[in-house]
Image (cartoon, helix red, strand yellow):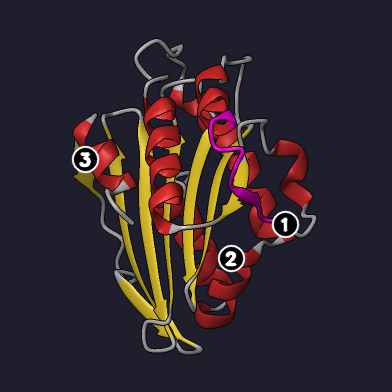
Amino acid sequence: MNGSVLDLFAKNGSLVAKDVSPWQTFSGKGMKFRLQSFDWDGCACLSHLTMRAFLGTMRMETVICTPYAKDLPIFSYDFINALGRRTLLMEVYDTLLHPADLSAIQEVKSRYGDLKDKTLKPNWYDSLRLAPSTAKVGGASRLSSMAMEMTAAYIGLFPAANEVDPAEKTVRNRAYVEGLIANGGPAINTIRQMLGNEAAETLFRRSLFGTE
């Protein structure tokens, strides 16, 4: 993909690396993962996870932003290239203390209606996926543009977003993360099989979402 979602965050706020030991890299079932986690601009946990499998014929990149000092939803970006079939997931999850205006992200989404929708299997967190969330398949250039524009729109919400008590906000974030741990999802199910329950749960709480 052209451009980097992680770089876009880096250009709009300071990144302070967090210790992710012992999960800087881990592997299993033919997959190799690399993990980074940061404090972003003193207001959010930002994590970056990449995966390569099958001699590089399958690749995945994930960026998750979990605000703890601003009242904005959790943001998740996933790009998957499997044997040349490219899928983009841009999702925002309702961990808000008060309603937020997400129309800027929705407006970007509406400009990419020409891209084919990806049908997702029903999951427990569907009710938490806010309206700007989308899943698309298509060419690398068009998907990259959509990802960068939606990310920029999300980042653009931070300056005017309400400041909140980090402890109160983390309670809301934790409810979503504990839901993932209790009910499962594609990523945590895979990582559980590789690392075991305790390590996978700690990785999600501490490094991916920063709720521990």
**Which residue shows up at 41% across the image and 23% down it?**
69
The front one of 190 and 18 is 190
Q: Which mark is residue 142?
A: none
Is residue 112 found inside the magenta-colored segment of the image? Answer: yes
CA–CA distance in space, label 1 to label 3: 32 Å
The reply to whether discs 1 and 2 touch (Cβ–Cβ < 8 Å) is no
Residue at point 80%, 55% (across, down) = 122
- How many angstroms separate mark 3 from mark 2 (CA)? 25 Å
Cβ–Cβ under 8 Å for marks 3 and 2:
no
Q: Is residue 42 above or below residue 90?
A: above
Q: Main secondary structure of the magenta part?
A: loop
Q: Which residue is mark 1?
A: 120
Q: Secondary structure at mark 1?
A: loop
Q: Examine the rendering and report whether any part of residue 13 can be seen.
A: no
Relative image position of residue 112 (x, y in whole percent): 55, 37
Residue 93 location, quadrant: top right
Check disc 3: other Cα within 10 Å, few if <14, some if 14-19, many if 20+: some
Q: Amino acid at mark 2?
A: Ile
Kindly identify which residue carries mark 2.
188
- Does residue 198 appear left or right of residue 20 in this picture? right
Q: Which residue is mark 3?
A: 15
Which is more N-terminal, label 2 or label 1?
1
Q: Residue at x 22, y 39 (%)?
A: 10
